[in-house]
Amino acid sequence: MLDLPEFETTDMSRERARHASEGALTLQVCDKCGLVQYPSRSVCRDCLSPALSWSAVPTAGRVIAMAVVHASLHSQFREQGPWHICSVVLDAGPRMLAFIADDAIRRGDAIEIQDQLVGEERRVLIAKQPGLPGTGEHR
């Protein structure tokens, strides 16, 4: 298993980490139209309202694609890898990329997203089998 890479921290990632609670997936939800937003943004991607609130959303979703990243052009990641990642569509609506927790996950599988704290101000998304506890290490 591979440790997660170090990430740069942005204002939006700090804000997401600040609002996240242990065990919950916390994303922005538009106060006007109710659309769940990911990634974080300053206005709703549908109605352009700036009224976005941080809320816990359901973690269930489905894997729509998988990949293994063997190399990165970003200097921060050049010496690390490979990373097993997947594209997920949440039942709540948004599509997102997540690290894959184990080899048993396949395209089309139902998964749960675990929102894991990395460092003091950064969270990463982990796709895991429903009902299984998360781990500190990922493929």
Image (tube, rainbow, N blue to C red):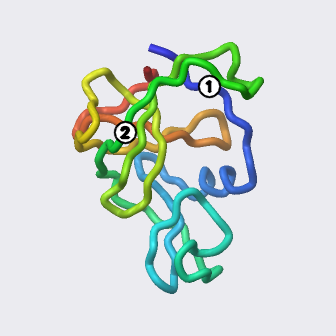
**Eyeballing the image, is 114 above or below 34?**
above
* Tag 2 residue: 65
Across and down, in percent, residue 94 comes to 43, 59
**Which image quarter is the C terminus in?**
top left
Residue lying at 30% horizontally and 50% vertically, measured from the top left: 61
Q: Quadrant of residue 43?
A: bottom right
Of badges 1 and 2, nearer the viewer stands: 2
For badge 1, the amino acid type reads Pro
The residue positioned 28% from the left and 42% from the top of the image is 111
Mark 2 is surrounded, within 10 Å at the Cα level, by few (under 14), some (14 to 19) or many (20 or more) other residues, namely: some
Q: In the image, what residue occupies the spot 61% across and 83% down?
A: 49
Within 10 angstroms of label 1, few (less than 14), some, or many (20 or more) residues? some
- Badge 1 marks a residue whose secondary structure is loop
At numbered mark 2, what does the secondary structure look like: helix, strand or loop?
strand
The residue that disc 1 covers is 5
Please provide percent x and percent y for residue 88.
38, 46
78 lies above or below 18: above
Earlier along the polypeptide chain: callout 1 or callout 2? 1
Q: Amino acid at mark 2?
A: Ala
Total marks drawn? 2
Q: Quadrant of the N terminus?
A: top left
Please state which of residues 109 and 120 is positioned toward the viewer in this rendering. 109
Q: Establish if 3 lies above or below 47.
A: above
Gap between marks 1 and 2 measured at Cα: 21 Å
